Amino acid sequence: MKFLKIFSLALSLIFLTACTNSFVNGNMLVKNTDKDKKSSVKGKKSSNSKSYTYKVRGKTYTTLGTHKNYNKQGTASWYGKPFHGRKTASGEIYNMYAMTAAHKSLPLGSKVKVTDIVNQRSVIVKVNDRGPFHGNRLIDLSYAAANKLGFIHSGVSRVEVTALK
């Protein structure tokens, strides 16, 4: 009986600890240490009122104030089933079959054209999440977007990301 009580208490503590952390794209967000104590999802507004900073795993990121003229090449990856049904940084529920993406600095809601540099296939996605926070990756695409670009099996691909008007 005593073991059951201790086990129940330990399980409750683990559950409560898990509930106090925020996750975006499967990565735990660390709360800002600024005086305003805003969570990292909202971040802290920078001097440009349209951008903000946030922290993930101790690293600080600053979003862009606008998506205009954004054009970069880099590595794309994709995320699917483990995140399907979870809340994204924008507050939307992640749908692995929708044409969406996670990006570290583009404003949430931005629409971008992603072109696979090797096969020249393109998709248009809406940025509704933050990430990827793994390696030097530029963008994390939904399963559907990665499937249309043709890199589900390889997991990553070289892409060009261009903001749309």
Image (cartoon, rainbow, N blue to C red):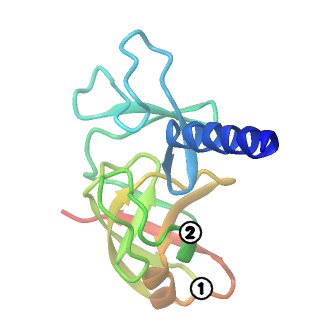
Name above or below for residue 103 compared with residue 65: below
What type is the residue that disc 2 sits on? Ala
Farthest residue, direction front: 1
- Regarding residue 120, the answer to whether it shows in the image is no
Q: CA distance from mark 1 to mark 2?
A: 9 Å
Give coordinates of residue 143: x percent, y percent. Answer: 49, 80
Tell me if label 1 and label 2 are in contact, CB under 8 Å: yes
The residue singled out by tag 2 in the image is 76
Name above or below for residue 74 compared with residue 154: above
Name above or below for residue 12 compared with residue 92: above
Residue 159 versus residue 150: which sits nearer the camera? 150
Circle on res. 151: 1
Give coordinates of residue 33: x percent, y percent. Answer: 50, 16
How many residues crowd mark 2 within 10 Å: few (<14), some (14–19), many (20+)?
A: many
In the image, taking residue 13 as reference, residue 162 lies left or right, namely left
The picture quadrant where one finds residue 123 is bottom left
Picture residue at 36% right of the left edge, 14% below the top: 36
How many residues crowd mark 1 within 10 Å: few (<14), some (14–19), many (20+)?
A: some
Picture residue at 50% right of the left edge, 62% below the top: 139
What type is the residue that disc 1 sits on? Phe
Circle on res. 163: none
- Regarding residue 86, the answer to whether it shows in the image is yes
Q: Element type at marker 2?
A: strand
Farthest residue, direction left: 165
The quadrant of the image that shows the N terminus is top right
In the image, taking residue 149 as reference, residue 106 lies left or right, namely left
The picture quadrant where one finds residue 153 is bottom right
Give coordinates of residue 35: x percent, y percent. Answer: 41, 9
